[in-house]
């Protein structure tokens, strides 16, 4: 096995996230629940304008209309992304959906205060947390890392999945790498194996190319 380790062709170590279509859809659909209050808030803002309110009431009505419209527009884009299996992942510095959702929560809190004279602190706290998640989206996602990833390096092949035991096979232990149209299978000596559902990955072509390179690297030993 030591000879096999020495004979495996060297190559750069790299790591790819395994972007699951199902998990991404579930995350986006969960976010869309924040758009439901925006519909009611849009109606409340329009009603205030029709009532001809002035001063604070007018400012509140305009704010409700603006943040609700922005959130609903963002929700339509999220819904469109859910329906596109091939939709690419964009790692922007901020998440505008969360920022607009924080605006809707703030408007809800101000609406409640305008009617009752009492600020709902839980709603305001949720608005602050949602705003922070939107503004620091890149830092937050970088801190928690991808839920699933594939790493191919000098030491071997490693598959990580959050809340699951990771799979690691050193090059001397890798028996074969099978690939077909919809799945990949990494088989280690002794019977250990890990399957990757390529049909469920948004970045399936990148993962396939990485595994093809790993198989060529193994075959050159």
Image: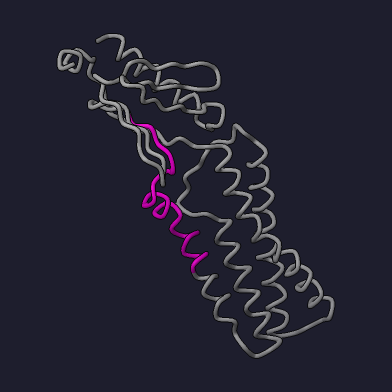
**x then y, percent, for residue 181:** 55, 17
Question: In the figure, residue 191 lies in which quadrant?
Answer: top left
| Residue pictured at 23% horizontal, 15% vertical | 8
Q: Does the magenta run of residues contain 141? A: yes
From the viewer's perspective, is residue 185 above or below residue 100? Answer: above
| Residue pictured at 62% horizontal, 33% vertical | 85
From the viewer's perspective, is residue 217 above or below residue 195? Answer: above
Task: Please indicate whether residue 109 sits to the left or right of residue 206 in the image.
Answer: right
Question: In the figure, residue 7 lies in which quadrant?
Answer: top left
**x then y, percent, for residue 105:** 61, 70
Where does the magenta region start and end? 129-151
Task: Please indicate whether residue 175 sits to the left or right of residue 185 in the image.
Answer: left
From the viewer's perspective, is residue 130 above or below residue 59? Answer: above
Tell me the quarter of the image containing the C terminus: top left
Please tell me which residue lies in front, 91 or 153.
153
Q: Does the magenta run of residues contain 104? A: no
Tell me the quarter of the image containing the N terminus: top left
**x then y, percent, for residue 111:** 68, 79
Secondary structure mostly seen in magenta is helix
From the viewer's perspective, is residue 53 above or below residue 182? Answer: below
| Residue pictured at 27% horizontal, 9% vertical | 220
Task: Please indicate whether residue 52 sits to the left or right of residue 153 in the image.
Answer: right
Task: Please indicate whether residue 88 sits to the left or right of residue 160 in the image.
Answer: right
Q: How many badges with numbers are in the image? A: 0
How is colour applied across the structure in the image?
A: one colour
The extreme front residue here reads: 190
| Residue pictured at 57% horizontal, 66% vertical | 102
Question: In the figure, residue 42 lies in which quadrant?
Answer: bottom right
The extreme bottom residue here reads: 117
The extreme right residue here reads: 50
């Amino acid at each position: 096995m030591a000879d096999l380790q020495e004979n495996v062709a060297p190559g750069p170590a790299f790591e790819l996230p395994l972007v699951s279509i199902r998990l991404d859809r579930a995350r986006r659909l969960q976010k869309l629940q924040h758009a439901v209050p925006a519909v009611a808030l849009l109606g409340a803002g329009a009603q205030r304008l029709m009532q001809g309110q002035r001063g604070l009431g007018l400012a509140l009505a305009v704010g409700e209309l603006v943040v609700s419209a922005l959130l609903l527009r963002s929700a339509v884009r999220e819904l469109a992304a859910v329906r596109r299996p091939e939709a690419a992942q964009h790692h922007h510095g901020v998440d505008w959906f969360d920022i607009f959702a924080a605006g809707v929560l703030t408007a809800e809190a101000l609406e409640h205060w305008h009617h009752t004279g009492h600020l709902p602190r839980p709603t305001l706290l949720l608005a602050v947390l949602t705003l922070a998640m939107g503004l620091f989206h890149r830092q937050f996602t970088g801190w928690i890392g991808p839920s699933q990833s594939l790493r191919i390096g000098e030491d071997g092949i490693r598959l990580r999945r959050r809340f699951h035991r990771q799979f690691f096979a050193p090059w001397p232990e890798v028996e074969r790498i099978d690939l077909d149209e919809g799945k990949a299978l990494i088989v280690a000596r002794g019977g250990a194996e890990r399957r990757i559902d390529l049909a469920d990955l948004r970045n399936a072509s990148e993962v396939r190319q990485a595994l093809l390179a790993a198989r060529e690297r193994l075959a050159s030993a």
